[in-house]
Amino acid sequence: MLKESIRKYALENAIKHKGRAAIGSIIGKLINDDPSIKSRLGGLNKEIQKTISEVNEIGLKKQEEELRKIAPELLEKRERQEHVLKELPNVSKNVVMRFAPFPSGPLHIGNARTAILNDEYCKKYKGKLLLVMDDTIGSEEKQIDKDAYSLILEGLKFLEIKHEKPIYKSDRLDIYYKYAEELIQKNKAYVCSCSSETIRENRKQKKECFCRKINLEDNKKRWKSMFDKKTKEGSYVLRIKTSMQDRNPAFRDRVLFRISERKHPRVGNKYRVWPLLEFSWAIDDHLLGMTHIIRGKDLMMESEMERYIWDIFGWKHADIIHNGLLSLEGVKISKSKSAKEVRAGKYLGWDDPRTWSLQSLKRRGIKQRAIRNFLLQFGLNQNEVTAPIDGLYSENRKLIEKEANRYFFIEKPVKIKISNIPKEIKTAKAPLHPDYPKRGFRELKVTDEFYVADKIEKNKVYRFMHLFNFKDNKFISGKHDEKLNAKMIHWLPIDNLVNVEILMPDGYTIKGLAEESVGYLNIGDIIQFTRFCFCRLDNKKDGKNLIFWYTHT
């Protein structure tokens, strides 16, 4: 019964995606039918992959015919929901938006969502997109990476996002100081020497600290002393004055500036007093003329603080739109972990597939259009979304399926010998692409010995793809005959093969053999190894030793 379910869901998924099924949504449907299957997925993966390979080989027409026989209800047409970006509020003629990455590493697929949304809206309203490197000093846990600046620009270029010349917050410290001093002069901010424990208790009790009551001149002196190297890091912070009765304790007298002696990758130790996110953005969003701001729902507090500061200065509010978090099933993205592993040499670099950076996706063969199409389907809203990564792969598959030529690869080859092969069968002609015969063929030499991946069982009929049928290691016939009910398998000749390594998304490398014609591919070519995966040729040591990066099934 379970095998039948796997088959029908594989057929349904293949038909939905123009003849190419993938594992993600099939697993989801199986678990939906029977939640207990989740605990058995490890043992089922091989069966599911095997079924997917078989289904993908028979072509769209036969897929539809088979599904009509076994589960006609799954063939019912469904309206495809069109994902159209909702209108922005208060749109004028001059829309100005910003993408503001913190340069702790390259952009990953999560960051790409915000970048793409900003880009799409600027195109929609013929607006201007500013790229602002949010490179204030950061924290001990989340530090700036000097290589991130160029990596971010590379990522945006890959995504084909049009933006203005980069602006660096680390170049704007004197501007922030000017407005900080205005807040102090207006008696809206004060320099505080209280410990975090004292502030936490004061917030709890809705009580003002002693520092808040210091007179203006002493506050100015304290502010000036923050710039003096004799003043230790952590001695003072600049706090904004809010109501200690505010319903949200975290909003009460938040920190605007702090001292940091850490060396900055761009400006070194030129500055030691650094603004926090909400202050620098309150100033820049006004001065840079932002009309609309897209930011994560986790930054609602910072948005409230921005509006509070705007009101102090009497500035017009930009429209802030919060976006819900997008999580990907089975994918853990952590820039801090990636940075640690890159620095330690455990990852290949920032384009290691385990980083999920845009560089790594590009190197795997994921197209920018697939990333854009995948992310845009979630729109702009505050809903938290968890999506299977297979959705991205499905979009990419649509783009590369036609261009990817087919070849044979076997991970753990097993040699078998077939008897009674007619002497006239000396070669096999296999199409480079089953749907585009005009593209040409690969020619594989035939002897009586072959490499196979499948376990050959007794009393069972098999068919070597593009070659002949056999049973019990004896030739039966050449032509494909459905009456034989032969199991289709791929194969390799035993001579003139190339060694192949395939780097997987988890960093594991699969090794095996592939047909000779693979050795003539060019770096960057995206192909499909039949019944296994799409992948991109990343490195050629020579024509006999090749390294591919796994793209997806």
Image (spheres, helix red, strand yellow):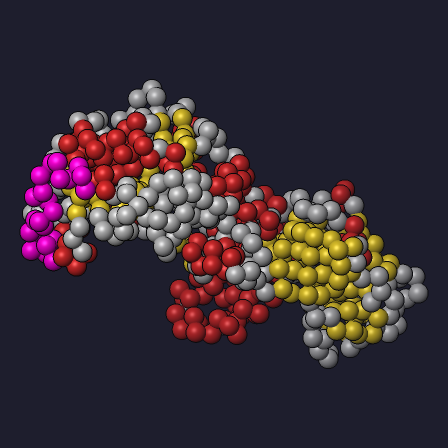
Can residue 18 be seen by looking at this rendering? Answer: no
Q: Nearer the viewer, residue 327 or 78?
A: 327
Q: Position of residue 452 (x, y in %)?
A: 74, 69
Answer with left or right where residue 309 lies relative to residue 550: left
Asked if 41 appears above or below 191 in the picture, the reply is below
Q: Quadrant of the C terminus?
A: bottom right
Residue at 45%, 40% in the rendered image: 266
Farthest top residue in view = 93
Q: Nearer the viewer, residue 460 or 91?
A: 91
Residue at 18%, 34% in the rendered image: 183
Q: Nearer the viewer, residue 149 or 438?
A: 149
Q: Position of residue 416 (x, y in %)?
A: 79, 74
Farthest right residue in view = 423
Q: Is residue 261 magenta?
A: no
Range shown magenta: 200-222
Residue at 35%, 33% in the rendered image: 172
Q: Nearer the viewer, residue 390 or 425?
A: 390
Q: Is residue 201 magenta?
A: yes
Answer with left or right where residue 413 lies relative to residue 5: right
Asked if 78 appears above or below 513 in the picture, the reply is above
Asked if 331 appears above or below 128 in the picture, the reply is below
Can you tell which quarter of the image residue 102 is in? top left
Q: Position of residue 226 (x, y in %)?
A: 25, 43
Farthest bottom residue in view = 458
